[in-house]
Image (cartoon, helix red, strand yellow):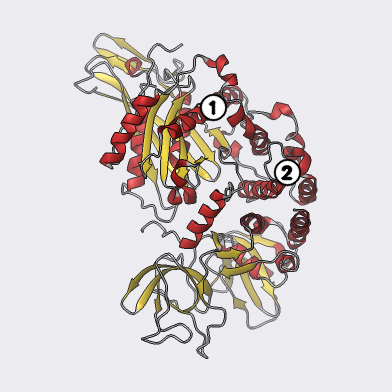
Amino acid sequence: MRDNILSTCEKNFLLQAINENKRLDGRQFHECRNETIHFGTDWGSCLVTLGETRVLAQVSCDIQPPKASKPNDGLLYVHVEMSPMAALHFESGRQSDISVQVNRLLEKCLKESKCVDLEALCIVSDEKVWNIRIDLNVMNFEGNLASCCSVAALAALAHFRHPDVTSTGEKIIIHPASEKDPIPINLHHYPVIISYALFNNGNHIVSDPTALEEKVADSLLLLSVNSYREICGMHFEGAPLPSSDVVIKCSRNAVNTATHLVKQIKKALSDDLEKRSRASFGGLSDSLDLNHIFSRIEENLRIDFKRECSWRDEPTPDVKPDIGGVIKMESDEDLNLDIDSDGISDSDGEDSKYSVKSVNQKTAELISKGPDLLDNDDTDMSDNGEVIEVPPKSDAKNLEEIELSGDSEEEDVVVLDSSIK
Amino acid sequence: MTNTDTDQQVVIPGDEITSFLQKGRNKIILGPGLRRVANKVYACNGGILRYRSPNTYWVDSHRKRYIPERNEMVIGIVVNKQGDYFKVDIGGSEPAILSYLAFEGATKKNRVKLEIGDLVYAKLLTATRDMEPELVCINAQGKSHVMGPLANDGYLFHCSIDLVRKMLNPKCPFDKIGDHFPYEIVIGMNGRIWLKTYTVKSTIALSKAILASEFLSFSEIQTMCDDLIKQYANS
């Protein structure tokens, strides 16, 4: 089935809202939807949600002969599966344009930025290497698929462990987990894709676009950035880039978002390790709220409404003092929807920052975090290694080439640093 | 199965619900989500079992996909113009057809101006399994009766089918907002809602309120509406 056609009405309204500096879901322009990361019982299985977009990743491995050109390197294979479950217009079993694109973006992000230590995956040179396969299943599509997939792929890779192998001359022995502890994959750095939608000739830049925003936008800019604030890849599609300033602006914001995302991934990983030692560990089933059926969807809608009201007080850096009426409404709700009570009381506490587990706490965190993204742009960089600025000239040049070619296979700027701390 | 009020009975596919049906009646009407096998009645959708006096039962389920049904009012997006027909996407498995002549006062000479991407509010004239559904924008008397093209300056958003049913329920308190907060709304049975107010922000607020009401009871919606009205008055 074809992609849903966009009605003129939706398009006009979105553009009108953007011109008035508003987004349809009540977010600020630079604000991302909240993401959650959950791990399954298996190594390398991970469920990531970004707003309503959900991706399930599973990493698996097998032993294969290496490529003749790189006899000492392991193999890395990424596959994105989009079923009609995610969105009506996806077809199963056939590669659509969007799945090819996301696949390619992920390969650029993970493979070509050399984030995985492929040499460590070699067992016998020229004969046997580990082949790592990342399968991504899109479970719901609500925009910014590349970003969600990249977080899922990265978290799953970091979580995955492959069996230990001993090589005794002629033959190799693969040890089951009961004999020898499986080995995690060595990651040099943690790149994630951050995407921006550009409106009105680059005057309005929106981060983490929804499906509708992606459709209406003039152009999309996807940056893969790692936690060391290095840009590992860039993808630009749509109308020509108005000026190179846009790229600088976006990449400044992207490095902050990426650092935050990677922090979340690491936090989720360490939490998972700790949870695994407990007997009650339930894998992905822990991510479900069993208290009522629609808990997850309702969460989002409720928060959206709250924020929609909070913008009535116009620019809302700190929403807290102004939302008395809304809080009252929520407390009414608490009487009926039992799970909400925790989240709301916790949301005022500073310590709930960067929490991954509870959706309630995290939504609160996103509200308070909003201004940080823009304001603390340069100030808090120092603690995290050096700042690597995008060389503006080379970017602009590359991007110009892209616009002219009009080709979707265009290329990126790779700022790689192999000597990683 | 927890046995509560008949009106709040949650059923899942395969549940036998014969025991909930009223005894002593020789005729019972089974609505959507229920199926009779031999002498027993089973639920074939997950949801809440509803009953309406005297003898009608059905299951209210959460659904996002629209299945066209005759006589339902839907909002469609014009996707193509071919010959004497518009092709209109109504969210079903295939686009519906809408004749140029199925508008009030339309003749071969005097055609309705509709572009690709425009919205129409129309009624399903036919909806069968084997043919593409057909829409009309006139009633039996040849009058438009609220149907027809929708203005392009509103906002169209999507929701689940059960929210639409809830919104169309006469008890739904959203009507009351209209006294304080002028708005124009068109609700299509296919899970599309067209909304227009004076400002962008009130449109966004109202659309979010509508979406948020999906899992609220009517009294909770009332609280939310009161809150919205209060905030609108303050802004």
Residue B177, visible in the rendered structure: yes
The amino acid type found where label 1 is placed reads Asn
Q: Which dot, 1 or 2, sits closer to the camera?
A: 1
Between A284 and A302, the residue placed more toward the observer is A302
- Give the percent coordinates (x, y) of residue A224: 42, 30
What chain does badge 1 belong to?
A: A
Same chain for the residues at labels 1 and 2, yes or no? yes
Residue at (36, 77) in percent of width and height: B85
Disc 2: which residue: A340
- Give the percent coordinates (x, y) of residue A47: 51, 37
Between A410 and A366, the residue placed more toward the observer is A410
**In this rendering, is residue B12 above or below A139?**
below
The amino acid type found where label 2 is placed reads Asp
Disc 1: which residue: A256
Between A364 and B34, the residue placed more toward the observer is A364
**In this rendering, is residue B58 above or below A94?**
below
Left or right of B3, for residue A410: left
Left or right of A32, for residue A106: left
- The mark found on residue A37 in the picture is none
- Give the percent coordinates (x, y) of residue A33: 57, 40
